[in-house]
Amino acid sequence: MLGKKPTESEPRGWPVAAGALGAAGIFVAAALAVMAGLVATGALRLVPALLGVVVLSIAALATAFRQKRRQEGLRMPDVSPHGSTPFADEHFLETILRGLADPVVALDRDGRILAFNAKAAQIAPALRRGDLAQIAFRVPEVVEAIRRAREEGEPQRVEFSERVPLDRWYELVVTRLIFEAAAGQLPRDLLLMTFHDLTPLRRVEEMRADFVANASHELRTPLAALSGFIDTLQGTARDDPAARERFLPIMQAQATRMARLIDDLLSLSRIELSAHLRPETPTDLVSIVRQVTDGLETLARDRDVKIMVKAPPAPVVVLGDRDELLRVFDNLVENALKYGASGKRIEIEFANGKTPEGGAEVQVAVRDFGPGIAPEHLPRLTERFYRVDVAESRAQGGTGLGLALAKHILNRHGGRLSISSVLGKGATFTVHLPIPKAGTGISANQ
Ligand code: ADP
């Protein structure tokens, strides 16, 4: 316990009571004298006179005690020199900690746990009131910070990480608080441990570092190929028209890949910048899908793949950015043509569905009947630069950014991308987009 409840060490009501009782005594003495006079003059007989004195004495004493109790009841609560600050009440302390957004633990001067909030219990399930802090936090940096805060009195800041059950990073600030005490009392001190979760920040830093490393690597590969061919054409193959004929198309493909990569990177950063802005232009998904399939007709013919669109006859209108949605479907249908061509056909089908929140949505599934994708890859496909088979993606001119872009575009539209696949049977990429509430002429599945 940080402190005890304030105690009454002194019967403070006594002076008041003594005064009241003294007045009652005088009143009884006066009554006694009057009765004695009346008995002496024969105006009153002895027995009734004595009875009168007893009754008057009892009434006077009862009034005196009643008055004492009333005065006690009106007295303000003590701010006793033996009591303590309001923080002595650990429930009060816990109530304050409950209102704080960060995980916080309060310790007494010996490092014993006095109070903590639910957030703190989440990061350190071993927290128990009355235990030493080092039992709950077995991290050397934390134990050392508590010791230094107690001994040096200065706030101590440390960063530490936990590996189990998941990688997490925290910043901890241990502050020593001293409450003034009354004369003759020892000051009370409290150690406050405040934690900040640095995990999201660290994850973003790691992702940014990975992204820069990946982007540079992706650009460096075609660049290295290009400069290799340039060297050869300037050197050994200077006068070799056959080599020039062979190399130039490869060089062009590499240059196109670089341009595509830069284009995808710029699109990603532009979409991320506008991620919080929901597009509001009514846009027909059927015409978008038709435009995409028309544009990919040549590639489909080259790959000997049939594209079948099962769309409603009337427009299916969502609120969206036409160019961005074109990009999503272009990527999905092109992927199906690139990676699922062995299935010989692609189906694009419209359906009505429900959002996870229960609202109405339109679903457009792009299904191929190619080799499919193993389940362990499915959750990672929308990560930047993630490919199931890097060599195949490069050979197909892929950048590894198409599905990441699709996911970001759909998020911005309040929708999502779902992926399902059975190995050997093909893959289905489904675009989910919310249907606006009223007046936009939605007619999916007609
Ligand atoms: P890429 O530029 O490599 O095509 P994407 O982000 O569009 O990048 O796709 C990521 C990876 O997902 C591809 O490299 C491929 O391995 C896999 N993938 C995408 N679509 C399909 C599909 N229809 N069938 C099989 N694998 C696919």
Image (cartoon, rainbow, N blue to C red):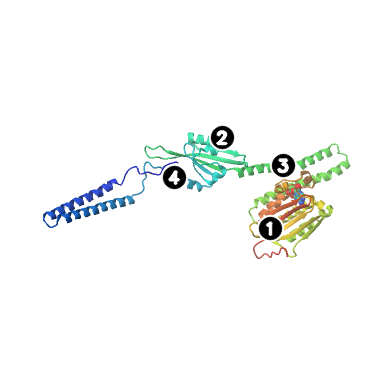
Instruction: Name the quarter where the N terminus is drawn.
Output: top left
Q: Position of residue 163 (x, y in %)?
A: 62, 39
Marker disc for residue 216? 3
Answer with the quarter of the image where residue 40 lies.
bottom left
Q: Is residue 363 visible?
A: yes
Amino acid type at circle 2 is Pro
Helix, strand or loop at disc 2? helix
Query: In terms of depth relative to the viewer, which is nearer, 424 or 336?
Result: 424
Can you identify the residue that label 2 sits on? 140
**Gap between marks 1 and 4 measured at Cα:** 54 Å
Q: Position of residue 208 (x, y in %)?
A: 66, 43
Marker disc for residue 150? none
Check disc 1: other Cα within 10 Å, few if <14, some if 14-19, many if 20+: many
Q: Earlier in the sequence, mark 4 or mark 2?
A: 4
Tell us which disc is closer to us: 1 or 3.
1
Check disc 2: other Cα within 10 Å, few if <14, some if 14-19, many if 20+: few
Helix, strand or loop at disc 1? strand
Marker disc for residue 89? 4
Tag 4–tag 2 contact (CB < 8 Å): no
Q: Earlier in the sequence, mark 3 or mark 2?
A: 2
Q: Earlier in the sequence, mark 1 or mark 3?
A: 3
Tell us which disc is closer to us: 4 or 3.
4
Amino acid type at circle 3 is Ser
Amino acid type at circle 1 is Leu
**In this rendering, would 376 be left or right of 25?**
right
Helix, strand or loop at disc 3? helix
Check disc 3: other Cα within 10 Å, few if <14, some if 14-19, many if 20+: few
Helix, strand or loop at disc 4? loop
Amino acid type at circle 4 is Asp
